[in-house]
Image: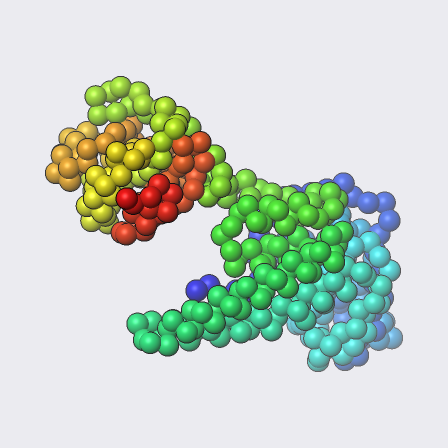
Amino acid sequence: MKQIFFSLLFTSLSSLVMAQTEAGFVITGNVSGLAEKSKVFLTDANNPKDTVSRGVVKDGVFVLTGHAVQPNIMELNFGSAQKKAPLFIGNETISVKGRVDNLRELVVTGSSSNDDFLEFQHTFNPYIVQLNAISQLSNSAQGQPKADSLSKAYAGLVASIQASQDKFLENKKSSFVSPFVLVVLSQLSDDVMLLEKRLHSLSPEVQNSMYGKYLQEQIENGKVGAVGTAAIDFTQNDTTGKPVTLSSFKGKYVLVDFWASWCRPCRMENPNVVATYNKFKAKNFTVLSVSLDKARNPWIEAINQDNLQWTHVSDLKFWNNDVAVKYKIQSIPQNFLIDPNGVIVAKNLRGPDLEAKLCELIGCN
């Protein structure tokens, strides 16, 4: 189970820039408890070293002016108090009132983006607190009977968050906060196709925002090997040096299996793959293994020892295997089940899961 935190560590976001607008922002602050002539400054939350504006407290009031490239999370820093507060603002006329000893209760007016940001916090912070509590309990209850109930509670809470997220996005298609919400809550799901659908439901301007561009980059990367996407075609030599192309298997269900002779978990999994292959090889199913070996002899010996009677390919480049790089393989074993049309229908099927999936798709009788 994942723990979710609202900490922005997206260093790559700072490189995504849009055209700067002509009009700027004006923030007028009346925050009690600040020392006279103390400094107040505004920084980009994604790049804290970037100071957007500076001001000085005079007669209890400070004024900050500047330009926001687009509505974004900023941090209002109170130097003398060594405290800061988040604001989600654009180029607007904004009023900030409150006390420096209670920044959570700051009253910010004049920014529709910050209003949406506050709604996001009020809606989802309680969920996140509950999720993290369940995660901690689950980690300490592994192997105990209550682990199953905690898992169900976690799944139910995630489902509620997803429903609330869709409602938020439906009501705020043109809000620059919406893609930020998607960035934060994308931690709860690995469904890259659903993430893309949600992003595309937003207005074009918002999709083209900093967070929108960041999401699009993550979606494109996440589509590599994602269920529901077309498998990336490749050609690599088999054990005899003959080139084999993945697309030549179209019309069949094919398991593309990444492994290596030196990978103990792979070798332990091989008997399961052999049993499933023997059961379904006459039913339009086969296996194409891609080895991350770096020497020919151990590769061939492992194929023979484990009785792997299907097609094998490798360029013997270890982790730099060209196919593994294309599929962004960073650990093995990994596999992708591809349907007769060349679409990935499942991935990382282990033990009885491969047989169960093929029974579902092809039938077991």
- Left or right, residue 132 beside residue 51: left
Q: Position of residue 94 (x, y in %)?
A: 84, 63
Residue in view at x 71 percent, y 80 percent = 101
Q: Position of residue 323 (x, y in %)?
A: 37, 32
Q: Position of residue 110 (x, y in %)?
A: 85, 63
Q: Is residue 345 above or below residue 89?
A: above
Residue in view at x 85 percent, y 45 percent = 22
Residue in view at x 41 percent, y 74 percent = 149
Q: Quadrant of residue 277?
A: top left
Can residue 292 be seen by looking at this rendering?
Answer: no
Can residue 247 be seen by looking at this rendering?
Answer: yes
Of all residues, the one furthest to the front in this rendering is: 365
Residue in view at x 64 percent, y 43 percent = 213
Of all residues, the one furthest to the top in this rendering is: 242
Residue 290 or 209: which is nearer the viewer? 290
Quarter of the C terminus within the rendering: top left
Quarter of the N terminus within the rendering: bottom left
Color style of the picture:
rainbow
Q: Is residue 92 above or below residue 349?
A: below
Q: Quadrant of residue 239?
A: top left
Q: How many marks?
A: 0
Residue 38 or 262: which is nearer the viewer? 262
Q: Position of residue 267 (x, y in %)?
A: 20, 45
- Left or right, residue 136 beside residue 309: right
Q: Is residue 328 above or below residue 104?
A: above
Q: Is residue 71 above or below residue 34?
A: above
